[in-house]
Image (cartoon, grey):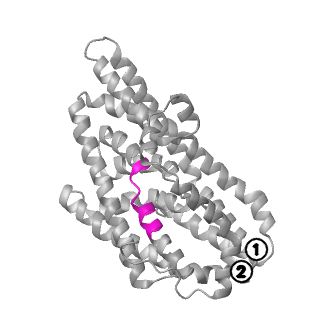
Amino acid sequence: MPKLAMHWWILIGLVLGVAYGYVAAISGSTEHVMDYIQPIGRLFLNLLKMIAVPLVLFSLVAGVASLNDSSKLGRIGGKSIALYLGTTAVAITIGLVVVNIFSPGAGLSEGTREKLMNAYGETASQKAAAASQVSIVDQLVNIVPTNPFGALADAQMLQVVFFALMLGIALTRLSRRVEGTTHVIKVFQLLSDAIIEMVQVIMKIAPLGVFAMLASVVADLGKDPAQLGDLLTSLGGYMATVVIALLVHYLVVYTALLKALTNVPWRKFAKAMVPAQLLAFSSSSSAATLPVTIKSVEEGVGVDEEVSSFVLPLGATINMDGTGLYQGVAAVFIANALGVPLDLGQQ
């Protein structure tokens, strides 16, 4: 009997988790799921988050230091950031085109609209007011941590990335004139490898963790089956729009980039990335998925460790194609649901 690959076990755990959560909801066993099943999912997610920050620090320092050339770092970093910003802009554009075609939320009933406004209107107003006070200059200044250890403790990823880049560059410069620096770099490389080894161990319980996370989410939503059905019906158009836009971006943009910039077959890339994508779907966390992404691209796609250890931690913090796409769709969906027309310029 053939042994199933890990991504199939994760997919099985995902499906069983949804089914178990729904059965628990309609049978009145929600408390059992929340008391005994949900902690398993939280434990799994905490294990992944536990190694995310050390992985970013160690892999970036080792990756930058191993380049042995600041100009090479600049070339890889510049191309990576340009690619990240460019694909994010394309993703948002695709999202806006698709949401204008399907117009999800436009048919929301007046009763549901009032219920949502009563439940979330005040919170939304507060967040909108807070967002209007955000300064781009302050955001850029805050990338530089005043206390690197505080940034590590608080999982401030952009600050961790900045500190790791600076430390890696400093070690590269130091290695040219101080003997023994290579031993320090090797320590960071070994620590990075040790974190990846921890990923191998944690992933053995990934199907169980995914099962627990999905079961608890569905069971919690389904405390009132009628409410769950109404909720899924109301959000179905929005969810379908996001999924369609994501598929277009994945199949068109990423396929074009693979063909234009690499010699990696699309099938090989798609197969290698399945575990990372399933985990990202179930955990909703780029940081938690990062260790699995690194493992997938190195072992499944064949990316060099010196490239993946630099590009992927950076991408986990600033490469937000999916996030940008769904937030663009969400903004128009909410406007449609509340009866607030937005022309293309406003969007």
Residue at 24 percent of width and 61 percent of height: 257
Percent across and percent down for residue 261 are 20, 56
Q: Is residue 295 visible?
A: no
Q: Residues within 10 Å of mark 2 (few under 14, many from 20)?
A: few
Which residue range is magenta in the image? 316-328
- Secondary structure under badge 1? loop
Q: Residue at x 35, y 52 (%)?
A: 300
Residue neighbourhood size for the residue with mark 1, other residues' Cα within 10 Å, grouped as few (<14), some (14–19), many (≥20): some
Q: Amino acid at mark 1?
A: Lys
Up the image or down, 134 lies above or below 156; here it is below
Judged by depth in the image, the label closer to the viewer, 1 or 2, is 2
**Is most of the magenta stretch helix, strand or loop?**
helix
Residue 322 in the image, given as x and y percentages of width and height:
42, 63
Q: Nearer the viewer, residue 193 or 167?
A: 167
Q: Nearer the viewer, residue 15 or 3?
A: 15
Q: State if disc 2 and disc 1 touch (CB < 8 Å).
A: yes
Residue 65: image x %, image y %? 32, 28
- The residue singled out by tag 1 in the image is 223
* Three-letter amino acid code at the position of disc 2: Gln
Residue 338 highlighted magenta (yes or no) = no
Q: Is residue 23 left or right of residue 253?
A: right
Identify the image quadrant of the C terminus.
bottom left
Does 171 appear above or below 102? Answer: above
- The answer to whether one can see residue 336 in this image is yes
| Image mark for residue 227 | 2
Q: Is residue 217 above or below residue 139?
A: below
Residue at (25% x, 16% y) in the render: 176
Q: In the drawing, what numbered circle is on residue 75?
A: none
Q: Is residue 2 left or right of residue 302?
A: right
- Is residue 57 left or right of 111 when viewed as pictured? left
